[in-house]
Each structure stands twice: as C-alpha cells, then as structure tokens.
Image (spheres, rainbow, N blue to C red):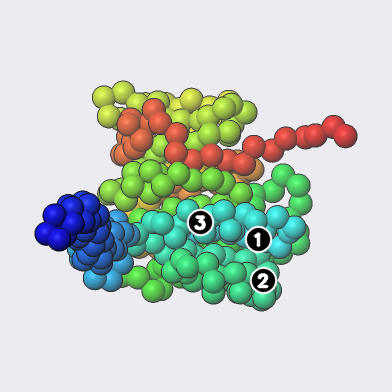
Amino acid sequence: MKSVFFSRFFILLPWVLIVIIMIDVDTKRTIRAPGAARTGRAQRAARTGAPGGPGAQNQSALPVIYAITPTYTRPVQKAELTRLAHAFRQVPRFHWILVEDSTTRTDMVTRFLARCGVPYTHLHVFTPRRFKRTGMPRATEQRNAALAWLRQRRGRRDPGVVFFADDDNTYSLELFEEMRSTRGVSVWPVGFVGGRSYERPLVSEGKVVGWYTGWRPDRPFATDMAGFAVNLQVILANPRAQFKRRGSQPGMQESDFLKQITKVTDLEPKANNCTQCFGWRRLRLMWLI
C-alpha cells in the first residue's frame, strides 16, 4: 500500500512544482505591472512637461515661443494647419498666434483651433483688395496685427521668442530647440527657397558674413521669413518696427523688417553654424497634365 502511495506521490510531484512556479511568476507580474505603468507615465510627463512630471517645473522656466501664422481660406487650408498643429503640440512652452486674412473669424478655423491641442490666440484682419495683386507683398497686415497683440499683452518680464511660421511650410522639432536660446535675432538655413535646394547665412568664426541664395543676394538680410527668430524683448524695445506695405518690394519684407531691429554683424547663427536645415518652404511645382 505504501509503495503505491509513494509511486503516485512522485508521479504527481513534478506537476505540483510546475503549478507552484507558474502561480509565483504570475503573481510577480501582477505586482510589477502597476509600477511599470507609473514609470512610463512619469517618463512621458518628464518629456512633455505634463502636470506632475519632474520636467514640468524645469520647462516653466523656458522662454515661450510665439509662432505667428498668417492664413487665408483656400481648399488646402485645413490640411496645412493640421500639419503645423501636429508639430506645434509637441513643443513645450509654445503659443500659436493665428491671424486670418478675413473680416471675421471663420467657423472652420475657430473649430479647428478649439480642438488642435495647442495654446493659441485667434486674430483676424482683412487685406485690402488693392494689395492682393500679383507680385505684391503678402500677409503684411496679419503679421503686424500679431506684433501689435504681443506689444499690448506682453511686458518686459515675459521671456519669449517670436517666430514667423507661415502655414505652407514644414518645421522640424529641432528648429524650436535651436531658436529657444535666441538673445537678439537668430538665423538658420531654409530648404526649397530662393531658387535653390536651400538658402543659408554664410558663417565665419561664429559671425554671419554673407548669404548663400539664388535670388537677390544683394539684399541686406537675404533670408526667408522662416529663416529667423526674434527675442520678444527686441520686439517690445522697437515698438515702431513692423512689416512695410509701402515702399517694400516683393521678397524684401524680411530685410525691411530686420533692418529696423538689428545688424548683420549681430545675428546669432543657429543649427550648427547654419550648416543644418530644420525648416522647409513648400516646394511649388507646375504639373503638366
């Protein structure tokens, strides 16, 4: 009888041990899972600066990036704004100033901004029809309206950087990291502009000494609207600086504006001494059908 009992015991013993091991492993997984989830949330909060994350306190000290975007009603408008919003919502301490070329705020843009997930200000100003002829400077009234808003709503204690982000351009997240440290006026290369694959400042010993461009290299500041950023305090310290409508030729608005607030020798090269490209103009192509 005992021999039968022991034989059955030794047959069942390995199976009992297997069950015990499986229960133990499953219990450990159950205990560890919540901790792993908390760690993942904490890591994401640290990267994004979400409330409760250790990165939130550090990011609150960053200068705010104010992106000024003129826009107007057209079939691709929502697609363009959606592309920008996907990038902008990943940038900490960011404020989007969207200015419509319209007599009122349109319903489409109003609804879009309410759901875009980016802190924003929604403005509108209509461009007189006499200024909409081919070859005339564009978005002048809209950019000036955004500058006026900043001068009315921000003061000397507000750290910030102003960037002119047209809605038909594409921007890498690295670009916002580069411009954040702007003390005066910073510059960098821009892709698909000036008749070349890129346009950039030429830098020697940390100073801008010229321009690589395919169009009007004689411009004092031969850069695109997407190729520079301005410290907010420079904007506030020059209350009369604005984009000119009268006397400004097409393609010269950047130079006409920058001449009012800085000198070429004072420009701050970014993007590894202007050797890397983090922003691109929309490449306009003519298709033959």
SS for callout 3: helix
Which tag, 2 or 3, sits closer to the chain's start? 3
Name the side, left or right, on which 254 lies relative to 283. left
The location of residue 152, given as percent across then percent down, is 41, 73
Asked if 197 appears above or below 248 in the picture, the reply is above
Asked if 267 appears above or below 32 in the picture, the reply is above
**Res. 86 mark:** 3
Is 141 in front, or is 71?
71
Between label 2 and label 3, give the one nearer the viewer: 3
Image quadrant in which you'd find residue 1:
bottom left
Q: Residue at x 38, y 56 (%)?
A: 91
Pointer 1 local density, CA inside 10 Å: few below 14, some 14–19, many at least 20: some
Task: Give me the C-alpha separation between circle 2 and circle 1.
Answer: 8 Å
Which tag, 2 or 1, sits closer to the chain's start? 1
The kind of residue on which mark 1 rests is Lys
Which residue in the structure is indicated by mark 2?
A: 108
* Outermost residue, right side: 289
Which tag, 3 or 1, sits closer to the chain's start? 1
Asked if 3 appears above or below 239 in the picture, the reply is above
* Outermost residue, left side: 2
Asked if 49 appears above or below 191 in the picture, the reply is below
Is 191 in front, or is 126?
191
Between label 3 and label 1, give the one nearer the viewer: 3
Name the side, left or right, on which 215 lies relative to 148. right
The location of residue 143, given as percent across then percent down, is 54, 59
Q: Residue at x 28, y 48 (%)?
A: 181
The kind of residue on which mark 2 rests is Met
**Res. 78 mark:** 1
Is residue 255 something that shows in the picture? no
Decide: marks 2, 1 in contact (CB < 8 A)?
A: yes
SS for callout 1: helix
